[in-house]
Amino acid sequence: MQSLERDPAFEPEILGEPHFGHPARSEQALEAVSSIHDVRCAERQMTLQEALTRERAAEAALLAGPIAMLALGWRALAEANFAVPDGMIRIVAQAALCVFAMHLLARAIVPRARPEILPLVGLLACTGLVFVTRLAPSAADQQANWLAVGTVALGLGMVAGRQPRRLKQLTYTSGLLAVLTLVATGLFGQTINGARLWVSLAGQSVQTTEFIKAFLILFLAGYLTDAGGVLAMPSGRFAGISVPGAAYVLPLALVLAGAVAALALLRDLGSIAILLTLAIALLYVATGRLRFAVAGFALVLATGVIGYVAFGHVQARVDAWIDPLADPTGSGYQSLQATYAVNAGGVTGTGVGRGMPTVVPAASTDYIYTAVAEELGLAGATGVALVFLVLIHAGMRVAAEAPTTYDRYLAAAIALLMGIQAAVIIGGNLRLIPTTGITLPFVSYGGSSLVVNLGLVGVLLGISHASRKRPA
C-alpha cells in the first residue's frame, strides 16, 4: 500500500481546507446547514408555544364554570326570596374579577403550569362564597375581600414556586417561624370554643394555625429531601431493634413533638391530627416504608386518646359523635342537626336558599359541607368531594413531573394537606369521625384559611411551571 506520508500530491488535502463540492467556501456551506437547523428549532418552538396557548385557553374556558356558579347561586337566592346582602352585585362582580385576575396572573407568571388546577380552586372558592352568602349574609362582603387578598397571595406563591431552590434555603427558618408563631399564639391569642387559635390583628381575627401548616410544609419538604434517603435504610438500632436512619428520625421526631405539644397547649386537636397525618404521609412518600405509616397511625390514635382524657371540649365532641341522642339539646344538638340536614337534601337537594341549613350551629365554617349536602343534595355534595379528589390528583401529577426531590416533596405536601383537611372536615360533617373544628379549604368562611391555601396553590403552580419549562 502506498504511504501518504510526505507525498506532495496529498499535502493540499491534508494541510489545506477540505473541499465540500460546493461553490461557496467551507464556512458558507456550514452556514446553510445551520440555517436549516435553526428553522427546525423555530418550528419546534412554535409548536410548544401553540401548545401552551391552547392550555391557557382551556384554562380560560374552564374558568367559566366558577363564574357560572356565582351567577347561578346569586339568581337561585333571589328566586328563593332570600334577603341577599346589600351590595351583592359588587360582591359577585368582585369575585368574578378575582377569578379573571387569577387567570391573568397564570398567563404572566406561570404560563407553563398545568391548566386544570386554577379552575378547580376557582370552583371551590366561588361555591364557598355562594354558601357563605346563604349562611352568613353579613360575612359575604368580607369573604369577597379575603378572596381578593388571596388572589394577591396566589400571585406571590407563583413567584415563590418558580424558585424552589430559594424555598429550600428556608427549611429551618420556616421551622423556626412555626415555633415562634405557636409561642406568639400562646402568649397573645384568643380562646374561642375551647381552643386558643386566634390572634387579633387590625381588628381582624387571624387563625395562626393556617400559617403554621404552611411553615411546616416547607420544613418537612426540605428536611425529607436531605434525610429521606437515609431514613429509607435500616442503619441504626434502638433497644436492640433495627431502626431506619435512627439518627435522622430523632430530629424530625423532636420537631413534631414540639409542634404537637404546643398545639396541645393551645387545645387544637384537629390541627394536631392533620399535621401528624401529613408528616406520616410525606415520610411514607420519602421512604416507602410501611412501618412509618403504621407507627404514625398509632401515634395519631394515641394523641386522640390523650386529648380525650385531657380536654373537656374534645371529650364532648367525641361523646356527641358516639351518641348524640344522649344530649339532643346540648352537646349532641349540632351533630343531630347536621345528620337531619344531610338526610333532608336527598339526591338533588332542596335548592339553594330553600333549605334550613342555618339550624346547624357554625354552618358557615365547621359544617358548611352539610349545607351543601342539604341544598345541592347528594349530587352536589359528591361533586364537591370529586373536585377535591381531582385537585389532589392534579397536585400529585405536578409532584410526579417535578425534576428534583425537593420539588416533588413540596408539591406532594401541598396536595396531601388539602386532601387530608378536606377528608377530615367532610368525615366530621357526615359523622364518620368526630368533628375537629377544621375548615373546608376554599369553601368555608375564614380569611386565614382562604389566603394561605391560595398562596399554597400559587406555589404548586410555580413548581408546575418550573418543571415543565425544561425541555423533554
Image (cartoon, rainbow, N blue to C red):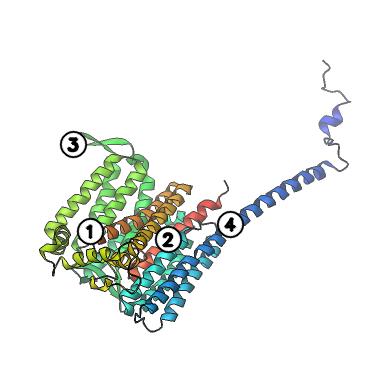
Q: Give the Cα separation between the discs numbered 4 and 3.
A: 56 Å
**Front: mark 3 or 2:** 2
Please state which of residues 470 and 439 is positioned toward the viewer in this rendering.
439
Instruction: Residue under label 4, please give it.
Output: 52
The numbered mark, 4 or 2, whose residue comes first in the sequence reads 4
Where is residue 174 shown, x and y percent of the image?
Answer: 35, 59
Q: Quadrant of the N terminus?
A: top right
In this rendering, position of residue 12 left or right of residue 71: right
> What secondary structure is marked by label 1?
loop
Task: Check contact, mark 1 vs mark 2: CB within 8 A.
Answer: no
Label 4: few (<14), some (14–19) or many (≥20) C-alpha neighbours in 10 Å: some
The numbered mark, 4 or 3, whose residue comes first in the sequence reads 4
Instruction: Residue under label 1, please give it.
Output: 431
The numbered mark, 1 or 3, whose residue comes first in the sequence reads 3
Q: Give the Cα separation between the discs numbered 1 and 4.
A: 44 Å
Instruction: Residue under label 2, please give it.
Output: 457
In this rendering, position of residue 434 left or right of residue 102: left
In this rendering, position of residue 457 left or right of residue 181: right
Instruction: Residue under label 3, please give it.
Output: 239
Identify which amino acid the numbered label 1 is placed on.
Arg
Can residue 168 be seen by looking at this rendering?
A: no
Q: Which residue is drawn at 11% across and 57% down?
A: 309
Q: Which residue is drawn at 30% across and 56% down?
A: 423
Where is residue 66 shown, x and y percent of the image?
Answer: 45, 67
Identify which amino acid the numbered label 2 is placed on.
Val
Task: Check contact, mark 4 vs mark 2: CB within 8 A.
Answer: no
Label 3: few (<14), some (14–19) or many (≥20) C-alpha neighbours in 10 Å: few
The numbered mark, 1 or 2, whose residue comes first in the sequence reads 1
Which residue is situated farthest in the bottom direction here?
86
Task: Check contact, mark 3 vs mark 2: CB within 8 A.
Answer: no
> What secondary structure is marked by label 3?
loop
